[in-house]
Amino acid sequence: MVNTVFYIKTCDTSRKIIKDFGLIHGFNLREVKSKQITEGELEELAQMAGSFEALFSRRSRAFTQKNLKGQKLTESQLKALILEEYTFLKRPVVVHNNQIFIGSSSKEKEKLSAALKA
């Protein structure tokens, strides 16, 4: 997967990261609400991340709506949920030079910054 950003255009945090890190240039911007992530793409991301759990957002409103809190979800269930509902994908997901950066934590932003400067 070539330099790609998976994001939602209504997510202020994702838009800020795209802008602040200059990801508009040299990256494929993939808005997952209008063009759902494919099973193949998700599997490739999970392989890079080490699990579907790493890509799964428990902060999604759908997490509460589906009453998933406290449930032990398997990798296959997590995969199915992300494919079913785009908001379950933690965002943004940035792929750069075969490295993956997931979410907006300070640690991930620092790692992304270092990778972009390398």
Image (cartoon, grey):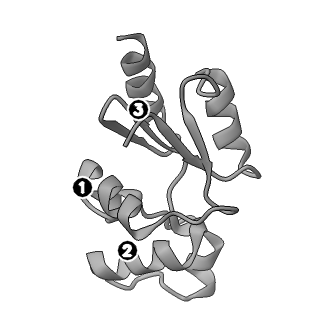
Residue 79 shows in the view: yes
Q: In the rendered view, would you say 7 is above or below 75?
A: above
Of callouts 1 and 2, which one flags the residue occurring earlier in the amino acid sequence? Answer: 1
Horizontal side of 15 relative to 47 (left or right) equals right
Label 3: state its secondary structure.
helix
Q: Label 3 amino acid?
A: Lys
Look at 28% across and 75% down and name the residue there. 75
Tell me whether circle 2 and circle 3 mark residues in contact (CB < 8 Å). no
Task: Tell me the amino acid under the disc marked 2.
Answer: Lys
Residue 106 lies, in percent from the top left, at 48, 32
User: Badge 2 is on which residue?
Assistant: 79
How crowded is the residue under tag 2: few (<14 C-alpha within 10 Å), some, or many (20+)?
A: many
The image quadrant where one finds the C terminus is top left
The residue at which mark 3 appears reads as 107
Numbered disc in front, either 2 or 3? 2
In the image, residue 29 lies at what x, y percent? 60, 41
Residue at label 1?
47
Name the quadrant containing residue 39. bottom left
Q: How far apart are marks 1 and 3 (CA)?
A: 20 Å
Check disc 1 and give the amino acid type.
Answer: Gln
Label 2 to label 3: alpha-carbon separation: 24 Å
Give the numbered dot on residue 103.
none
Label whose residue precedes the other's in the sequence (2 or 3):
2
Q: Residue at x 46, y 66 (%)?
A: 38
- Nearer to the camera, 53 or 44: 44
Depth-wise, is mark 1 or mark 3 nearer the camera? 1
Earlier in the chain: of badge 1 and badge 3, it is: 1
- Tell me the CA gap for discs 1 and 2: 12 Å
Q: Do the residues labelled 1 and 2 touch (CB within 8 Å)?
A: no
Residue at left offset 64%, top offset 42%: 14
Q: What is the x, y in percent for residue 15?
A: 70, 38
Residue in the picture at 56% in, 38% down:
28
